[in-house]
Image: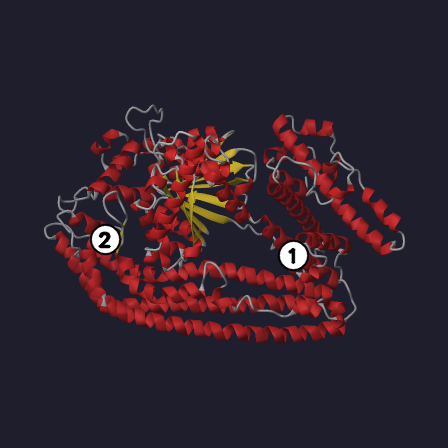
């Protein structure tokens, strides 16, 4: 079996049959020769067999289409005076689609359908682009094999460029909301899968992160369960018990902490956990059902349906039953779970989108909290979910938005905040009797709720430092009515709007166009390298482009340097302000106005958490590191948002303005002999800018977060010392330790934070310029200074990919690209 067959079986979700195909030595040629009897023998099970037949039929149609395009092109060149000969070429291969209609070449057929025109057009367009992408990938795979095995610069360069065509663009949608707000029902309804995430009487736990994405490998429902480490759980137990020798004063915890501890330990160990020591609770007998926890492996669950998988998952993602509820689960493992990734088969909305059900504001467990920050920072969209009847006044929803705003904004890549008011049909039991009146009443209530929510958002000054009004959209949804359709039209439920949003996020057109454009450039380079003519013009163009590249890099360097100097000025002001307000900041944390007898536990929790006390049921999050670095981050917030916008181009667009003007050169006749090489350079230029923009997006998160992280590092010795304090006067001794350390470090700590951020910024700017220069110089020299001695002939492949590119662009000529 060759790579083409292997890739197709994986792509079609039939990976379980790979071994059977391998045993029968099915390669690319024999794949196209399979008849009904052969397929029945290969795949005896009806479900996957019918799926395979459908996909193979579509693949044959695609091959027929490609051959037709190529043959038409050749015939037109050779028989321009004989139109009848050209027309006859459309029958080069037999139709496998059950029709002889020549107008259906593109597969975005114009046949009759019960679907709406918009959905029908989208379906056909998506299908056509999937076929194009699959075919071009096949072409490039074949070209890769045709490149000579000699170890020389050009061959190695071409192999690397072909391998680099594959990209996995994935958008992440984070979903926040307290238990009971309707998150699970919302996700189930939007992705069109019933019973995937449990909802209703079974309570969601607050710490497990659940990712939902597409299963591209097979047709099963699957889940990967990632556990925290044994060491992390041991640390949590230490916090729960606060040491066997802890005295009464240091062992104080607020009611919220206490309830969290009881819930976690009772779920995992049962009600008699208080009678056991920490050592007893680490006994292997408690983890027999999950050996993966101690082996540091992921646990994999599978199911033939969403409901089957959900039943297996419940003990890893949910809390125990309330009184009177029937439930067979004896032990709940969610306290040990870091993340669950659920993969759903055959779901186009999740093809390039991952939906993440997120805890509100991270977790006390450091492993879970680090993952939470990374995921929130990677979300391009955030859904804040709350019930409609309390949407504007629900404090938890707004607290989540405020606490996570910096992780989503300057330290993230969020472009859209959707405030989703669920259960919008809750007013259906109103005084109105007529269904039409009830519908009108619900819609008016929804409109009023949207106005109130937008008004509340306008008051969030912290959030609005990172997000504009345009990025904030309110939805009023009813998952129940979307399924039942009793009182509201489907569009009234606004679930279709969210589905359309996810469909647009998938952006399969962009993925296909990027791949095909890159393939077109590489094939142009190969074809150009095989030609011997134009040596003089190649040398002249190479010299001109190298000089042009240097000039363009100079245009980038100057504004970047100005940006650096602006940040340096802002941070210098932030350092001075941090020093002047230090006493006020410290007092607000270690001497708050409301600091009763229970404050011992609060302050102890802050130092035990290395400066961070996570939110519980009874108190908000306290982050001393963030408070100490607040003046520094505030000093650069506005400049940072303009320099690294989540929407728009970084560094005020100077990178995107970089251009060798190769498009204009291709239009001039004097460059006819290097048009193919110029086509390659056009695609290379776009590709490197896309790559660097992605790197900037990732690195800017680290740069922004470095201010607080440097402060935390500088404070770590203080926290370690304070953790050891016990006995009488503990509270005052911890306060004195913190004050002494901060005053002794203030002249160094804030300056170090400033210097570290500027160093990271300098490193990023240097990397951008060096990588851009290295990539483009190599591409220029490889395309214009190198001739292919034994380069393969790709005339046919180039013409096929060029036609696909025209089709995607909707333009008669790829030169418009």
Residue neighbourhood size for the residue with mark 2, other residues' Cα within 10 Å, grouped as few (<14), some (14–19), many (≥20): many
Graded by Cα atoms within 10 Å as few (under 14), some (14 to 19) or many (20 or more), the crowding at tag 1 reads many
Mark 1 element type: helix
Residue 255 versus residue 636 in the image, above or below: above
Q: Residue furthest right?
A: 81
**The C terminus lies in which quarter of the figure?**
bottom right
Compared with 171, 318 (above or below) is above
Q: Quadrant of the N terminus?
A: top right
Relative to the observer, which residue lies in front, 534 or 121? 121
Closer to viewer: mark 2 or mark 1: 1
Asked whether residue 361 appears in the rendered view, the answer is no
Q: Give residue 676's position: percent from left, percent from top.
A: 72, 63
The image position of residue 392, as x and y in percent, is 33, 46
Q: Above or below — where is 7 with respect to 567?
A: above
Callout 2 secondary element: helix
For the image shown, how many numbered marks are present on the structure?
2
Q: Are marks 2 and 1 in contact (CB under 8 Å)?
A: no
Distance in Å between CA atoms under marks 2 and 1: 54 Å
Q: Say which of 450 and 559 sits in front.
A: 450
The residue at 60%/69% (across/down) is 659
Nearer-N-terminus badge (2/1):
1
Q: Mark 2 — residue?
A: 607
**From the viewer's perspective, is 765 left or right of 15?**
left
* Residue holding disc 1: 517
Q: Identify the mark at residue 774; answer none if there is no mark.
A: none
Q: Confirm whether residue 780 shows in the render.
A: yes
**Residue 19 to residue 508: above or below:** above
The residue drawn where x is 80% and y is 40% is 93
Residue 406 drawn at (x, y percent): 36, 56
Pinpoint residue 329: horizontal percent, then vertical percent. 35, 27
Q: Quadrant of residue 735?
A: bottom left
């Amino acid at each position: 079996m060759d790579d083409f067959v292997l890739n197709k079986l994986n792509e079609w979700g039939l990976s379980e049959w790979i071994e059977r195909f391998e045993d029968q030595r099915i390669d690319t040629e024999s794949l196209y020769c399979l008849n009904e009897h052969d397929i029945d023998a290969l795949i005896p099970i009806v479900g996957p067999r019918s799926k395979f037949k459908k996909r193979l039929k579509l693949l044959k149609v695609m091959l027929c289409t490609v051959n037709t395009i190529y043959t038409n092109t050749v015939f037109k060149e050779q028989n321009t005076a004989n139109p009848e000969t050209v027309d006859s070429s459309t029958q080069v291969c037999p139709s496998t689609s059950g029709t002889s209609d020549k107008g259906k070449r593109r597969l975005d057929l114009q046949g009759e359908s019960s679907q709406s025109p918009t959905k029908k057009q989208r379906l056909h367009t998506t299908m056509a682009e999937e076929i194009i992408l699959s075919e071009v990938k096949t072409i490039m795979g074949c070209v890769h094999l045709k490149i000579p095995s000699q170890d020389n610069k050009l061959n190695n360069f071409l192999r690397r460029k072909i391998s680099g065509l594959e990209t996995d663009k994935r958008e992440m949608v984070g979903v926040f909301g307290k238990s009971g707000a309707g998150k699970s029902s919302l996700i189930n309804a939007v992705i069109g899968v019933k019973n995937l995430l449990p909802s209703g009487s079974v309570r969601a736990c607050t710490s497990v992160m659940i990712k939902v994405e597409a299963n591209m490998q097979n047709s099963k429902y699957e889940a990967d369960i990632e556990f925290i480490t044994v060491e992390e759980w041991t640390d949590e137990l230490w916090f729960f018990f606060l040491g066997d020798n802890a005295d009464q004063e240091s062992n104080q915890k607020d009611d919220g902490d206490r309830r969290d501890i009881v819930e976690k330990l009772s779920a995992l160990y049962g009600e008699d956990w208080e009678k056991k020591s920490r050592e007893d609770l680490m006994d292997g007998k408690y983890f027999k059902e999950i050996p993966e926890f101690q082996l540091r492996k992921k646990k994999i669950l599978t199911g033939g349906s969403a409901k089957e998988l959900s039943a297996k998952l419940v003990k890893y993602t949910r809390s125990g039953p309330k009184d009177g509820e029937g439930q067979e689960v004896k032990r709940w493992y969610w306290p040990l779970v870091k993340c669950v990734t659920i993969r759903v088969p055959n779901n186009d909305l999740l093809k390039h989108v991952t939906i993440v059900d997120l805890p509100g504001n991270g977790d006390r467990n450091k492993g879970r909290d680090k993952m939470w920050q990374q995921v929130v920072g990677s979300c391009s969209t955030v859904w804040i979910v709350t019930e409609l009847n309390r949407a504007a006044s629900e404090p938890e929803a707004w607290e989540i938005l405020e606490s996570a705003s910096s992780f989503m904004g300057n330290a993230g890549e969020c472009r859209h905040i959707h405030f989703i008011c669920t259960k919008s049909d809750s007013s259906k039991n109103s005084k109105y009797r007529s269904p039409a009146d009830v519908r009108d009443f619900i819609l008016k209530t929804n409109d009023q709720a949207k106005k109130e929510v937008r008004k509340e958002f306008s008051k969030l000054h912290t959030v609005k430092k990172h997000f504009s009004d345009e990025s904030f959209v309110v939805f009023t949804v009813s998952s129940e009515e979307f399924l039942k359709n009793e009182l509201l039209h489907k569009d009234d439920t606004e679930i279709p709007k969210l589905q359309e949003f996810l469909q647009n996020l998938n952006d399969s057109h962009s993925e296909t166009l990027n791949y095909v454009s890159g393939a077109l450039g590489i094939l142009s380079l190969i074809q150009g390298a095989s030609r011997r003519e134009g040596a003089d013009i190649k040398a002249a163009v190479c010299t001109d482009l190298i000089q042009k590249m240097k000039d363009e890099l100079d245009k980038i360097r100057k504004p970047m340097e100005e940006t650096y100097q602006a940040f340096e000025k802002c941070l210098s002001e932030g350092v001075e302000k941090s020093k002047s307000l230090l006493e006020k900041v410290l007092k607000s944390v270690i001497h708050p106005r409301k600091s009763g007898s229970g404050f011992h536990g609060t302050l102890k929790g802050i130092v035990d958490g290395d400066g961070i006390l996570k939110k519980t049921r009874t108190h908000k999050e306290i982050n001393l590191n963030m408070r100490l670095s607040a003046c520094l981050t505030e000093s650069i917030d506005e400049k940072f948002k303009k320099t690294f916008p989540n929407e728009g181009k970084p560094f005020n667009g100077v990178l995107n303005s970089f251009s060798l003007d190769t498009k204009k050169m291709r239009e001039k006749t004097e460059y006819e002999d290097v048009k193919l090489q110029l086509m390659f350079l056009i695609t290379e230029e776009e590709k490197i800018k896309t790559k660097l923009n992605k790197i900037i997006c990732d690195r800017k998160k680290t740069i922004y977060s470095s201010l607080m992280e440097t402060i935390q590092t500088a404070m770590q010795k203080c926290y370690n010392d304070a953790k050891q304090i016990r006995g009488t006067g503990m509270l005052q001794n911890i306060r004195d330790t913190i004050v002494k350390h901060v005053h002794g470090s203030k002249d160094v700590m804030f300056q170090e934070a400033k210097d570290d951020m500027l160093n990271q910024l300098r490193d990023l700017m240097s990397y951008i310029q060096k990588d851009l220069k290295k990539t483009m110089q190599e591409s220029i020299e490889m395309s214009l200074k190198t001739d292919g001695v034994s380069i393969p002939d790709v005339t046919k492949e180039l013409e096929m990919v060029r036609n696909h590119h025209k089709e995607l662009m909707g333009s008669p000529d790829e030169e418009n690209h």
